[in-house]
């Protein structure tokens, strides 16, 4: 046993040049750096709960700088030598529920077992958790499971330092996720909504119809966790509903959720148009509120888009294409206050909307964009949520968006916001007989104009192009993905460098092999890792690729688990939705419409498969 006193110092990042001393397990501000008094004790058992610090995403990947960069104080650190560390330095495929176990050459003084001396970091963000000591062994237990596909760094101060600044640093990588298939038909779900939001805890909200009553009715929602039901099915529509549609759901990381749908009741007497009513229902504190709030419906086509901000404010945009029952066409917006009361509507545009919008928020800044039509002319309109007035602004036309915009009902733009709330939009535009992908960018606030459109797709063009294109902000850059081609379709991606404000090289994914016409879906976590899900060339199959921000490289394409379809199955249509949370957990909902021929009379038999594929 070495009885000599050792003093180890680490640069303060949180005290702005002030000096802190360790005394009795607490931090005290000191005028001059001095070695702390030797503490009595050591050994035994103790617990220390650690807090968290801010996060940073740098260079399209997490910052994993070793040594003093992550430690949050200056302290005298007479820790013994490190004998072993679990997970080991450089270890890969670590389980997400792993603890960090440090064995020292002798029991460290209990007062020194704290976050000033020992820390686990995700980039520069300290992972919150609890330190406990049992003799010479110290264990760090994270509050939440570690993020999949992420790199972590352990830092402590000991004589066995392996960094120039005197710190002991070890790095490890958490395993990739595993896919699990759930057949939602066995859970009573037959038709799916077009989103699958995930909470921070990994619960996925699935919406759909069970076809137990009228057409598309009843509409329902249910929570799933890692592929298993986590709640009972909640029916949204009324028992009397004859036709249901316009279903849209959203949830935030905390688990607040909103559902919107439109239902038609029984035909009135005398015969006439059935009554059409839109409803919204909120989910708070672990339960769906019993009140179903009726909201105005602008038109017969029912398109809508719900969104739940991280602050718990629900937003709903409704889109009309043609008037009915005296209701005007155009775009309406609603949102809730802190108590959950619906406010509005705000009338954003008098023009008919060709389909639902894209809605995105960054903090309290919100932007919505859609394709509008007036007098046969199509263009992109967008509106901003003004926190000063607590209302949506009137829509404006995106400069340059009218040129070549296809006059078809599913011309929906892609939309994402950067960390400052500035938007970037993508849309497909026709040039001659082909489509190209264009983008528009606004910086500096709602009063600033959009820059001139840039070409995203480079030399890649096709008779067909995915609408809407996939678009995310990965913490540093915007990343786009889309399917395009003529006879054969291929999957492409490109990155918008926010430092140069320009698009980079277009890359063909899936090893440049053909893909199906299923729209590619893109998701990201706060570390800049990406997941893209797309239709493989094999009928009735989905594939995915992962992008590692740490090594800045895409993985090879792999197929997701799928049910076996009959050899004579003919694909009619399909679509997928993808959600991912900050821990890298993901969920994919996958709906297949397919048909077979009756072996006796040759009639076509229609089938519908609804699947949930969980990544954990």
Image (spheres, rainbow, N blue to C red):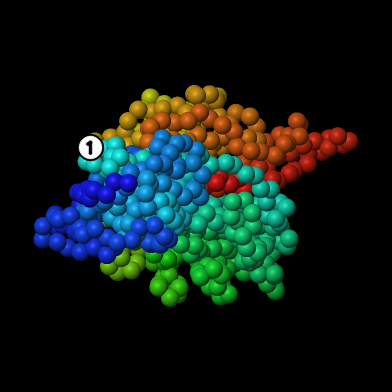
State the residue position of label 1.
164
| Of 264 and 36, the residue lying toward us | 36
Residue 437 drawn at (x, y percent): 39, 35
Which residue occupies 38% across, 61% down?
48
Whether residue 60 is visible here, answered yes or no, is yes
Residue 591 drawn at (x, y percent): 63, 45
For residue 432, above or below residue 144: above
| Of 97 and 449, the residue lying toward us | 97
Which residue occupies 69% across, 48% down?
183
| Of 2 and 542, the residue lying toward us | 2
* Badge count: 1
Which residue occupies 73% across, 62% down?
213
Whether residue 325 is visible here, answered yes or no, is no
Which residue occupies 41% across, 35% down?
90
Q: Quadrant of residue 210?
A: bottom right
Q: Quadrant of residue 441?
A: top left
Q: Quadrant of residue 405?
A: top left
Residue 312 drawn at (x, y percent): 42, 66
Q: Secondary structure at mark 1?
A: loop
Residue 547 drawn at (x, y percent): 44, 35
């Amino acid at each position: 046993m070495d009885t000599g006193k050792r003093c180890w110092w680490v640069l303060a990042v949180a005290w702005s040049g002030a000096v802190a001393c360790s005394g009795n397990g607490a931090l005290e501000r000191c005028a001059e750096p001095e070695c702390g008094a030797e503490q009595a004790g050591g050994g035994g058992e103790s617990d220390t709960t650690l807090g968290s610090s801010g996060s940073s995403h740098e260079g399209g990947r997490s910052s994993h700088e070793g040594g003093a960069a992550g430690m949050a104080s200056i302290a005298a650190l007479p820790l013994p030598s490190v004998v072993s560390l679990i997970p080991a330095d450089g270890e890969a495929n670590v389980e997400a529920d792993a603890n960090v176990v440090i064995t020292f050459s002798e029991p460290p003084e209990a007062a020194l077992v704290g976050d000033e001396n020992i820390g686990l970091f995700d980039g520069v963000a300290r992972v919150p958790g609890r330190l406990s000591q049992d003799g010479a062994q110290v264990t760090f237990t994270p509050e939440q499971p570690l993020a999949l596909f992420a790199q972590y760094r352990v830092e402590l101060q000991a004589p066995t330092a392996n960094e120039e600044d005197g710190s002991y640093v070890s790095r490890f990588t958490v395993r990739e996720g595993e896919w699990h298939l759930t057949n939602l038909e066995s859970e009573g779900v037959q038709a799916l909504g077009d989103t699958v939001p995930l909470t921070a805890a990994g619960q996925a909200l699935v919406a759909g119809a069970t076809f137990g009553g009228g057409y598309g009715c009843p509409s329902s929602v249910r929570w799933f966790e890692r592929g298993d039901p986590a709640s009972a099915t909640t029916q949204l529509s009324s028992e009397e509903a004859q036709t249901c549609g316009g279903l849209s759901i959203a949830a935030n990381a905390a688990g607040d959720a909103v559902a919107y749908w439109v239902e038609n009741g029984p035909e009135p007497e005398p015969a006439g148009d059935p009554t059409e009513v839109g409803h919204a229902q909120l989910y708070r504190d672990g339960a769906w509120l019993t009140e179903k709030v009726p909201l105005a419906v602008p038109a017969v086509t029912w398109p809508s888009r719900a969104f739940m901000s991280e602050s718990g404010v629900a937003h709903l945009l409704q889109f009309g294409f043609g008037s009915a029952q005296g209701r005007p066409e155009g775009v309406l917006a609603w949102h809730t206050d802190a108590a959950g009361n619906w406010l509005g509507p705000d009338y954003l545009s008098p023009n008919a909307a060709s389909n639902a919008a894209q809605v995105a928020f960054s903090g309290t800044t919100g932007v919505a964009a859609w394709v509008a039509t007036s007098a046969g002319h199509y263009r992109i309109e967008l509106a901003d949520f003004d926190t000063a007035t607590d209302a949506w602004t009137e829509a404006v036309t995106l400069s340059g968006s009218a040129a070549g915009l296809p006059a078809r009902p599913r011309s929906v733009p892609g939309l994402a916001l950067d960390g400052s709330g500035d938007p970037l939009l993508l849309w497909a535009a026709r040039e001659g007989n082909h489509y190209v992908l264009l983008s528009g960018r606004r910086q500096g606030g709602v009063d600033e104009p959009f820059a001139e459109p840039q070409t995203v797709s480079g030399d890649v063009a096709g008779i067909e192009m995915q609408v809407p294109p996939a678009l995310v902000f990965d913490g540093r850059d915007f990343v786009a993905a889309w399917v395009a081609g003529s006879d054969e379709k291929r999957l492409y991606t490109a990155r918008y460098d926010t430092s140069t404000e320009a698009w980079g090289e277009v890359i063909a994914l899936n090893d440049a092999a053909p893909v199906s016409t299923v729209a590619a879906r893109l998701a990201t976590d706060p570390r800049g890792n990406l997941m893209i899900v797309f239709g493989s060339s094999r009928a009735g199959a989905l594939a995915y690729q992962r992008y590692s921000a740490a090594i800045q490289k895409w993985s090879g394409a792999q197929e997701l688990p799928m049910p076996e379809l009959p050899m004579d199955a003919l694909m009619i249509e399909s679509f997928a939705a993808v959600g991912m949370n900050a821990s890298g957990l993901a969920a994919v909902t996958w709906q297949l419409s397919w048909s077979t021929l009756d072996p006796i009379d040759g009639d076509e038999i229609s089938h519908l498969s609804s699947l949930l594929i969980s990544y954990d």
